[in-house]
Image: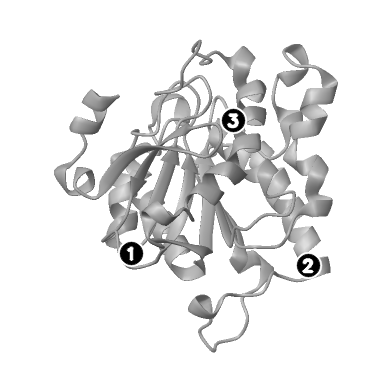
Amino acid sequence: MIERFAQLPSALKSASRLVRLGPAEVPALLAHPDWSTPAPTVLWMHGRTVDKTLDPGRYLRWIRAGIAACAVDLPGHGERPGPRLHGPEHTLYVVERMIAEIDGVVDALAERRWGGAFDRERLGVGGMSAGGMAALRRCCDDHPFRAVAVESTVGDFSVMPYRERFTPDLIDRLDPIRHLDGWRCVPLLALHSERDQWAPAQGMRNFVDAVRERCAQTGPAPVPPSAQTGQTPASVEETVRLVTWPQTGAPNEHAGFGRFANDAKNLQVEFFRRWL
Protein backbone atom coordinates (compact mmCIF):
# COMPACT_ATOMS: atom_id res chain seq x y z
CA MET A 1 0.00 0.00 0.00
CA ILE A 2 2.89 2.37 0.73
CA GLU A 3 4.11 1.64 -2.80
CA ARG A 4 0.70 2.53 -4.22
CA PHE A 5 0.70 5.76 -2.22
CA ALA A 6 4.12 6.59 -3.64
CA GLN A 7 2.67 6.18 -7.13
CA LEU A 8 -0.07 8.76 -6.59
CA PRO A 9 0.18 11.98 -8.61
CA SER A 10 2.59 14.33 -6.84
CA ALA A 11 -0.07 17.03 -6.44
CA LEU A 12 -2.29 14.58 -4.57
CA LYS A 13 0.50 12.89 -2.63
CA SER A 14 1.69 16.19 -1.20
CA ALA A 15 -1.85 16.95 0.01
CA SER A 16 -2.56 13.47 1.44
CA ARG A 17 -1.86 11.34 4.49
CA LEU A 18 -2.34 7.64 5.18
CA VAL A 19 -3.96 7.22 8.61
CA ARG A 20 -6.12 4.92 10.74
CA LEU A 21 -9.48 6.22 11.90
CA GLY A 22 -12.04 5.29 14.53
CA PRO A 23 -12.31 2.40 16.99
CA ALA A 24 -11.89 -0.10 14.14
CA GLU A 25 -8.68 1.66 13.01
CA VAL A 26 -10.01 1.88 9.48
CA PRO A 27 -7.20 2.54 6.97
CA ALA A 28 -7.88 5.85 5.26
CA LEU A 29 -6.38 8.24 2.77
CA LEU A 30 -7.04 11.82 3.83
CA ALA A 31 -6.57 14.61 1.31
CA HIS A 32 -7.11 18.28 2.10
CA PRO A 33 -6.77 21.49 0.06
CA ASP A 34 -4.46 23.17 2.59
CA TRP A 35 -4.70 21.26 5.91
CA SER A 36 -5.68 24.40 7.80
CA THR A 37 -8.91 25.95 6.52
CA PRO A 38 -12.08 24.02 7.50
CA ALA A 39 -13.21 22.30 4.30
CA PRO A 40 -16.31 20.39 3.28
CA THR A 41 -15.42 16.71 3.40
CA VAL A 42 -16.57 13.61 1.53
CA LEU A 43 -16.29 10.09 2.93
CA TRP A 44 -15.72 7.80 -0.06
CA MET A 45 -15.91 4.00 -0.17
CA HIS A 46 -14.49 2.04 -3.09
CA GLY A 47 -15.89 -1.10 -4.71
CA ARG A 48 -15.06 -4.75 -4.24
CA THR A 49 -11.56 -6.07 -5.17
CA VAL A 50 -9.78 -2.68 -5.17
CA ASP A 51 -8.66 -0.20 -2.47
CA LYS A 52 -8.84 3.43 -1.40
CA THR A 53 -6.06 4.58 -3.74
CA LEU A 54 -8.09 3.71 -6.84
CA ASP A 55 -8.94 6.64 -9.11
CA PRO A 56 -6.73 9.34 -7.57
CA GLY A 57 -8.04 11.82 -10.12
CA ARG A 58 -11.29 11.92 -8.17
CA TYR A 59 -9.57 13.17 -5.04
CA LEU A 60 -7.44 15.63 -6.99
CA ARG A 61 -10.54 17.24 -8.44
CA TRP A 62 -12.09 17.47 -5.02
CA ILE A 63 -9.19 19.21 -3.33
CA ARG A 64 -8.81 21.59 -6.27
CA ALA A 65 -12.48 22.44 -5.74
CA GLY A 66 -11.85 23.06 -2.03
CA ILE A 67 -13.28 19.71 -0.88
CA ALA A 68 -11.41 17.34 1.43
CA ALA A 69 -11.44 13.58 0.87
CA CYS A 70 -11.61 10.73 3.34
CA ALA A 71 -11.24 7.53 1.32
CA VAL A 72 -11.33 4.30 3.31
CA ASP A 73 -10.53 0.65 2.65
CA LEU A 74 -13.50 -1.68 2.80
CA PRO A 75 -13.19 -4.62 5.22
CA GLY A 76 -11.00 -7.33 3.70
CA HIS A 77 -9.42 -4.88 1.24
CA GLY A 78 -6.34 -2.70 0.96
CA GLU A 79 -4.47 -2.28 4.25
CA ARG A 80 -7.07 -4.14 6.29
CA PRO A 81 -5.66 -7.04 8.31
CA GLY A 82 -7.04 -10.54 7.95
CA PRO A 83 -8.29 -12.56 4.99
CA ARG A 84 -9.11 -10.94 1.67
CA LEU A 85 -12.87 -10.59 1.16
CA HIS A 86 -12.86 -9.85 -2.56
CA GLY A 87 -15.25 -12.55 -3.77
CA PRO A 88 -18.92 -11.85 -4.57
CA GLU A 89 -19.92 -14.27 -1.81
CA HIS A 90 -18.55 -11.74 0.70
CA THR A 91 -20.21 -8.60 -0.66
CA LEU A 92 -23.02 -8.09 1.84
CA TYR A 93 -20.88 -9.08 4.82
CA VAL A 94 -18.35 -6.45 3.75
CA VAL A 95 -21.12 -3.88 3.29
CA GLU A 96 -22.60 -4.58 6.72
CA ARG A 97 -19.22 -4.23 8.47
CA MET A 98 -18.47 -1.02 6.63
CA ILE A 99 -21.81 0.53 7.57
CA ALA A 100 -21.09 -0.19 11.24
CA GLU A 101 -17.73 1.60 10.98
CA ILE A 102 -18.85 4.79 9.23
CA ASP A 103 -19.81 6.72 12.35
CA GLY A 104 -16.47 5.98 14.01
CA VAL A 105 -14.63 7.27 10.94
CA VAL A 106 -16.74 10.45 10.87
CA ASP A 107 -16.18 11.06 14.58
CA ALA A 108 -12.43 10.65 14.11
CA LEU A 109 -12.40 13.55 11.65
CA ALA A 110 -13.23 15.84 14.57
CA GLU A 111 -10.17 14.80 16.60
CA ARG A 112 -7.85 17.57 17.73
CA ARG A 113 -4.96 16.24 15.68
CA TRP A 114 -6.68 17.61 12.54
CA GLY A 115 -7.08 21.12 13.92
CA GLY A 116 -10.63 21.50 12.66
CA ALA A 117 -9.58 20.99 9.03
CA PHE A 118 -12.57 18.75 8.30
CA ASP A 119 -15.84 20.67 8.53
CA ARG A 120 -18.29 18.37 10.32
CA GLU A 121 -21.16 20.67 9.30
CA ARG A 122 -20.49 20.06 5.61
CA LEU A 123 -20.12 16.32 5.17
CA GLY A 124 -20.89 14.26 2.10
CA VAL A 125 -20.77 10.51 1.60
CA GLY A 126 -20.53 8.26 -1.40
CA GLY A 127 -19.13 5.17 -2.95
CA MET A 128 -18.86 2.92 -5.94
CA SER A 129 -20.53 -0.50 -6.22
CA ALA A 130 -20.28 -2.18 -2.78
CA GLY A 131 -19.14 1.13 -1.29
CA GLY A 132 -22.19 2.79 -2.77
CA MET A 133 -24.44 0.20 -1.16
CA ALA A 134 -22.91 1.03 2.21
CA ALA A 135 -23.47 4.75 1.63
CA LEU A 136 -27.10 4.32 0.62
CA ARG A 137 -27.98 1.99 3.48
CA ARG A 138 -26.28 4.21 6.06
CA CYS A 139 -28.34 7.16 4.86
CA CYS A 140 -31.56 5.25 5.49
CA ASP A 141 -30.98 5.93 9.20
CA ASP A 142 -30.28 9.20 10.98
CA HIS A 143 -26.96 10.54 9.71
CA PRO A 144 -24.81 13.70 9.52
CA PHE A 145 -24.43 13.91 5.74
CA ARG A 146 -25.68 16.75 3.55
CA ALA A 147 -25.31 15.03 0.19
CA VAL A 148 -24.89 11.51 -1.21
CA ALA A 149 -23.20 10.52 -4.49
CA VAL A 150 -22.90 6.95 -5.75
CA GLU A 151 -21.66 5.19 -8.87
CA SER A 152 -22.42 1.82 -10.44
CA THR A 153 -24.35 0.56 -7.44
CA VAL A 154 -27.88 -0.54 -6.59
CA GLY A 155 -30.38 0.58 -4.01
CA ASP A 156 -32.83 -2.22 -4.76
CA PHE A 157 -31.39 -5.68 -4.17
CA SER A 158 -34.27 -7.43 -5.96
CA VAL A 159 -32.31 -7.09 -9.22
CA MET A 160 -29.25 -8.85 -7.76
CA PRO A 161 -28.60 -12.63 -7.47
CA TYR A 162 -28.35 -12.36 -3.70
CA ARG A 163 -30.99 -14.93 -2.77
CA GLU A 164 -28.54 -17.56 -4.02
CA ARG A 165 -25.71 -16.30 -1.78
CA PHE A 166 -27.10 -14.72 1.36
CA THR A 167 -29.79 -15.31 3.95
CA PRO A 168 -33.10 -13.48 3.52
CA ASP A 169 -32.54 -11.76 6.86
CA LEU A 170 -29.20 -10.30 5.79
CA ILE A 171 -30.61 -9.13 2.46
CA ASP A 172 -33.64 -7.53 4.05
CA ARG A 173 -31.50 -5.85 6.70
CA LEU A 174 -29.20 -4.21 4.15
CA ASP A 175 -31.46 -3.59 1.13
CA PRO A 176 -31.72 0.23 1.02
CA ILE A 177 -35.10 0.37 -0.70
CA ARG A 178 -36.65 -1.54 2.20
CA HIS A 179 -35.59 1.14 4.69
CA LEU A 180 -36.67 4.38 3.06
CA ASP A 181 -38.88 5.28 6.01
CA GLY A 182 -35.69 6.61 7.57
CA TRP A 183 -34.41 8.41 4.46
CA ARG A 184 -33.92 12.16 4.92
CA CYS A 185 -34.26 13.93 1.59
CA VAL A 186 -30.76 15.27 1.11
CA PRO A 187 -29.44 15.72 -2.45
CA LEU A 188 -28.58 12.44 -4.17
CA LEU A 189 -26.59 11.90 -7.36
CA ALA A 190 -26.37 8.43 -8.92
CA LEU A 191 -24.22 7.72 -11.99
CA HIS A 192 -24.61 4.53 -13.98
CA SER A 193 -24.07 2.74 -17.28
CA GLU A 194 -27.27 1.32 -18.74
CA ARG A 195 -25.33 -1.81 -19.71
CA ASP A 196 -23.65 -2.40 -16.35
CA GLN A 197 -23.13 -6.18 -16.20
CA TRP A 198 -22.65 -6.42 -12.42
CA ALA A 199 -25.02 -3.81 -11.00
CA PRO A 200 -28.10 -3.53 -13.23
CA ALA A 201 -29.15 0.06 -13.79
CA GLN A 202 -32.73 -0.85 -12.93
CA GLY A 203 -31.63 -1.47 -9.35
CA MET A 204 -30.63 2.19 -9.08
CA ARG A 205 -33.54 3.51 -11.11
CA ASN A 206 -36.03 1.77 -8.80
CA PHE A 207 -34.34 3.32 -5.77
CA VAL A 208 -34.20 6.83 -7.23
CA ASP A 209 -37.87 6.65 -8.18
CA ALA A 210 -38.75 5.55 -4.64
CA VAL A 211 -36.65 8.34 -3.10
CA ARG A 212 -38.30 10.92 -5.34
CA GLU A 213 -41.72 9.68 -4.31
CA ARG A 214 -40.78 9.92 -0.66
CA CYS A 215 -39.26 13.38 -1.04
CA ALA A 216 -42.33 14.63 -2.89
CA GLN A 217 -44.32 13.66 0.20
CA THR A 218 -41.95 14.78 2.95
CA GLY A 219 -40.22 17.72 1.28
CA PRO A 220 -36.47 18.21 0.89
CA ALA A 221 -34.03 18.48 3.76
CA PRO A 222 -33.07 22.07 4.66
CA VAL A 223 -30.56 23.56 2.21
CA PRO A 224 -27.30 24.68 3.89
CA PRO A 225 -26.49 28.40 3.65
CA SER A 226 -23.52 27.65 1.39
CA ALA A 227 -25.89 26.08 -1.18
CA GLN A 228 -28.56 28.77 -1.05
CA THR A 229 -28.64 30.88 -4.21
CA GLY A 230 -31.68 33.04 -3.62
CA GLN A 231 -33.32 31.34 -6.58
CA THR A 232 -36.44 29.21 -6.61
CA PRO A 233 -35.95 26.17 -4.34
CA ALA A 234 -34.68 23.12 -6.21
CA SER A 235 -37.23 20.55 -7.31
CA VAL A 236 -37.10 16.89 -6.32
CA GLU A 237 -35.93 16.05 -9.85
CA GLU A 238 -33.05 18.49 -9.45
CA THR A 239 -31.93 17.29 -6.03
CA VAL A 240 -32.44 13.55 -6.63
CA ARG A 241 -30.73 12.70 -9.91
CA LEU A 242 -29.91 9.57 -11.87
CA VAL A 243 -27.53 10.16 -14.77
CA THR A 244 -26.86 7.24 -17.10
CA TRP A 245 -24.96 6.56 -20.30
CA PRO A 246 -26.14 3.97 -22.88
CA GLN A 247 -22.65 2.48 -23.17
CA THR A 248 -19.31 3.69 -21.80
CA GLY A 249 -16.67 1.20 -22.91
CA ALA A 250 -15.60 0.57 -19.31
CA PRO A 251 -14.73 -3.02 -18.25
CA ASN A 252 -18.02 -4.88 -17.81
CA GLU A 253 -19.64 -1.44 -18.14
CA HIS A 254 -19.05 -1.28 -14.38
CA ALA A 255 -15.51 -0.23 -13.47
CA GLY A 256 -15.46 3.49 -14.18
CA PHE A 257 -17.21 5.20 -17.04
CA GLY A 258 -14.81 4.66 -19.92
CA ARG A 259 -14.94 7.47 -22.45
CA PHE A 260 -17.38 9.34 -20.20
CA ALA A 261 -15.13 9.24 -17.13
CA ASN A 262 -14.34 12.95 -17.37
CA ASP A 263 -18.03 13.82 -17.64
CA ALA A 264 -18.82 11.66 -14.62
CA LYS A 265 -16.12 13.27 -12.49
CA ASN A 266 -17.23 16.76 -13.49
CA LEU A 267 -20.83 15.98 -12.56
CA GLN A 268 -19.80 14.65 -9.18
CA VAL A 269 -17.47 17.48 -8.19
CA GLU A 270 -20.04 20.09 -9.20
CA PHE A 271 -22.67 18.21 -7.19
CA PHE A 272 -20.57 18.32 -4.04
CA ARG A 273 -19.54 21.94 -4.63
CA ARG A 274 -23.17 22.95 -4.82
CA TRP A 275 -24.57 21.00 -1.90
CA LEU A 276 -21.81 20.97 0.71
Mark 2 or 1, nearer chain start = 1
Res. 66 mark = 1
Q: Which of the two residues, 244 or 271, is positioned nearer the viewer here?
A: 271
Q: Position of residue 23 (x, y in %)?
A: 56, 35
In the picture, residue 232 is in which quadrant? bottom right
Q: Which residue, given by chain and number where applicable, does mark 2 sit on?
A: 216
The residue carrying pointer 2 sits among few (fewer than 14), some (14 to 19) or many (20 or more) residues within 10 Å by Cα, namely: some
Q: For this view, does 201 lie left or right of residue 159?
A: left
Q: For this view, does 139 lie left or right of residue 43?
A: right
Q: Is residue 12 visible?
A: yes
Marks 1 and 3 sit apart, C-alpha to C-alpha, by 31 Å
Mark 2 or 3, nearer chain start = 3
Q: Position of residue 275 (x, y in %)?
A: 51, 68
Residue farthest toward the left in the current orientation of the protein: 10
User: What element does badge 2 sit on?
Assistant: helix
Three-letter code, disc 2? Ala
User: What element does badge 3 sit on?
Assistant: loop
In the picture, residue 87 is in which quadrant? top right
User: What residue sits 45% from the left and 22% below the top?
Assistant: 80
Mark 1 or 3, nearer chain start = 1
Three-letter code, disc 1? Gly
Residue farthest toward the front in the current orientation of the protein: 112
Marks 2 and 1 sit apart, C-alpha to C-alpha, by 32 Å
Q: Which residue, given by chain and number where applicable, does mark 3 sit on?
A: 199
**Tag in front: 1 or 3:** 1
Q: Which of the two residues, 109 or 56, is positioned nearer the viewer here?
A: 109
Marks 2 and 3 sit apart, C-alpha to C-alpha, by 27 Å
Three-letter code, disc 3? Ala
Res. 162 mark = none
User: What element does badge 1 sit on?
Assistant: loop
